Amino acid sequence: MRITAKSDYAVRAMAELAAAEGTPLTAEQVATRQDIPLRFLFGILRELRLAHLVRSVRGPEGGYLLARPAKEITLADAIRAMDGPLANVRDVGLSGLEYPGAAAVLPDVWRAVRASLRQVLEKTTFADLATGELPPLVQARAREYLDDVRHYDT
């Protein structure tokens, strides 16, 4: 799976909003803290607002806030708002996906990939990011990656 810049920036922006604990942050503050291009961030915040994940507050003390408590919003919510389903194969649903011959079991691989992504992204909330305390499954998977002797570059 490829995490797009748009999803990466959205998750990082929402992590900043979660860490602010109900204090509105301006787009400029978020952009500066996370090194996100401001013009790109405005579009992302608009999409997050349309997805009901963030809300804006007007006025001199205004800015952006999470629309719900950080513990109720998962990373999967933000990624889906930006890019759609977590794992897609040629924009076809995985339920009825079938291949012939030697690739007949490949749809099960794609289903396993989606299930693995969901286990991590649907269990990790923005409260977890804000506190720096990731769920045990996520910590274990991160350790597996770091301990892998091949040390992937990509």
Image (cartoon, rainbow, N blue to C red):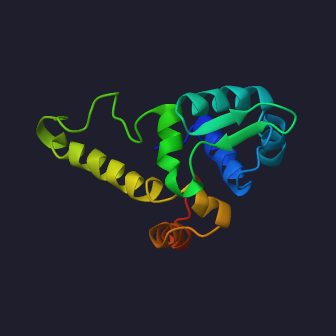
| Furthest residue toward right | 60
In x, y percent, where is residue 84? 44, 33
**Picture quarter containing residue 10?**
top right
Q: Give the residue displayed 66% in from the left and 60% down from the top.
A: 130
For this rendering, which residue is in front, 104 or 65?
Answer: 65
In x, y percent, where is residue 16? 72, 50
For this rendering, which residue is in front, 18 or 114?
Answer: 18
In x, y percent, where is residue 78? 53, 42
Picture layout, residue 146 above or below residue 17: below
For this rendering, which residue is in front, 17 or 106?
Answer: 17
| Furthest residue toward front | 59
**Position of residue 115 in the picture relative to residue 146 (left or right):** left
**Picture quarter containing residue 36?**
top right
**Position of residue 136 in the picture relative to residue 102 (left or right):** right
**Position of residue 111 in the picture relative to residue 75 (left or right):** left
**Position of residue 98 in the picture relative to residue 147 (left or right):** left
Picture layout, residue 47 above or below residue 136: above
Picture layout, residue 95 above or below residue 153: above
For this rendering, which residue is in front, 8 or 147?
Answer: 8
Residue 71 in sight here? yes
Q: Give the residue displayed 60% in from the left and 70% down from the top.
A: 133
